[in-house]
Image (spheres, rainbow, N blue to C red):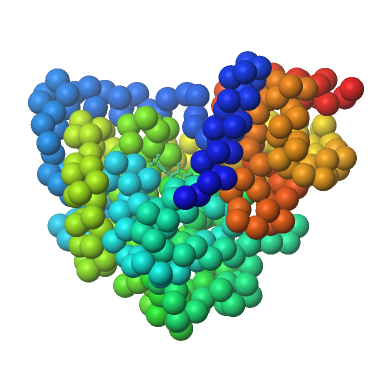
Amino acid sequence: MAEHSSSIFAEMSGLAAEVGAINLGQGFPDTDGPQALKDAAIAAISGGRGNQYPPANGIMPLREAIAAHQSRLYGLSVDPVTDVVVTTGASEALVASILALVEPGDEVVVFEPWFDIYTAAISMAHGRRVGVPMSGPDLRPDIEALRRAVTPATRLIIVNSPHNPTGVVFTRDELLAISEIAIASDVLVLSDEAYEHLWFDDNRHLPIATLPGMFERTITIGSGGKSFSFTGWKVGWASGPTDLIAAVRVVRQHLTFVSGGPFQWAMALGLRLPEEYFIEFRADLAAKRDLLAGGLASIGLRVLKTQGTYFITTDVRPLGYADGLEFCRDIPGRAGVVAIPHQGLCDDHAVGGPYVRWAFCKQPDVLERAIDQLSSGLAH
Ligand SMILES: *Cc1c(COP(=O)(O)O)cnc(C)c1O
């Protein structure tokens, strides 16, 4: 069961705790989201809305807000009554979807490095994971490898864009190529869009479900935690065609049954926030990205351009390290900073080899301290 993935975060967090290091391994913000959402959650609790089991598929105002959001941003038409399910974070939506769709022996294609929940859920479903690398110097999805990886045994392709851990946002052409392969082989797509609002510069997020022939074969997943900086509230959702969502609903009913009621009221407000919220959110994160990227480049690492997510990827070879895991084991002691090696998130360690993931969703003074410690710690 996803042996190395569960241990890489444990190992690095353990190291961080041991030496009191700054933890840039963990992908969550150290500042909260909008006060209006806190007020909405508090008002719901005080007003008795959602304190007892809410409806199994989510409160109607949130399902309507999800449907309106998909329509407003992406032109996707989903019926809040039948085509949406609210879950305990995007995590539960992912696990429920994989358990609902994957039969023992089915192959599931994942891009490597992957998000560790995919591989754990594929194991729980007794499916077989098949890796396709993010490849080349900019770690783009390897479309030719995907073509070779899809076989008659393939049930599902998991797409994650913006992509954790690389920070890559898939282009329209890449998504089109993936969709052509999915349609030609009649496989389903699970699209993890937890970072749909965290794209930078002109790398606008595009849901694969918007491409021709894709809506009917795609489950699209969103995360309120990532979109509104309340990762502790654990509200997520899945939307898509009625038949696929019905299958997800059946499974997730037996996982958590329902998800935190008052937070659903707050998320319904969040999804209807004006465009300015999302613009400011991205601008704030982009500034943090630039701060950390500049610092990492100044100590000699090759810094890949982050197009989306909370994460910067660097290649450690210019500093004389051949291997990202060795680098990540070394820097807590030398510099008091923790990061995550990509190879802990790959079956094929050659894929992740020299790459390391750094979270920049932290306050500027934390990022500045990390850069100072790295530059003095790695200098001698
Ligand atoms: C954080 C994350 C999730 C899980 O989101 P939650 O809403 O916190 O459960 C899913 N996918 C990716 C790629 C993530 O980084």
Q: Quadrant of residue 187?
A: bottom left
| Residue found 13% across the figure and 39% down from its top | 54
Instruction: Return the residue found at the far bottom.
Output: 184
Q: Nearer the viewer, residue 2 or 238?
A: 2
| Residue found 74% across the figure and 28% down from its top | 331
In x, y percent, where is residue 36? Answer: 31, 27
| Residue found 75% across the figure and 36% down from its top | 327
In x, y percent, where is residue 319? Answer: 85, 38
Q: In the image, 292: left or right of 232?
A: right
Q: In the image, 91: left or right of 369?
A: left
| Residue found 51% across the figure and 55% down from its top | 161
In x, y percent, where is residue 113? Answer: 59, 53
In x, y percent, where is residue 255? Answer: 24, 46
Q: Quadrant of residue 13?
A: top right
Q: Quadrant of residue 217?
A: bottom left
Q: In the image, 69: left or right of 329?
A: left
Q: Quadrant of ligand 1?
A: top left
Q: Nearer the viewer, residue 277 or 194?
A: 194
Q: In the image, 316: left or right of 213?
A: right
Q: Using the image, determine if residue 324 lies above or below residue 175.
A: above
Q: Using the image, determine if residue 142 lies above or below residue 26.
A: below
> Does the image show residue 187?
yes
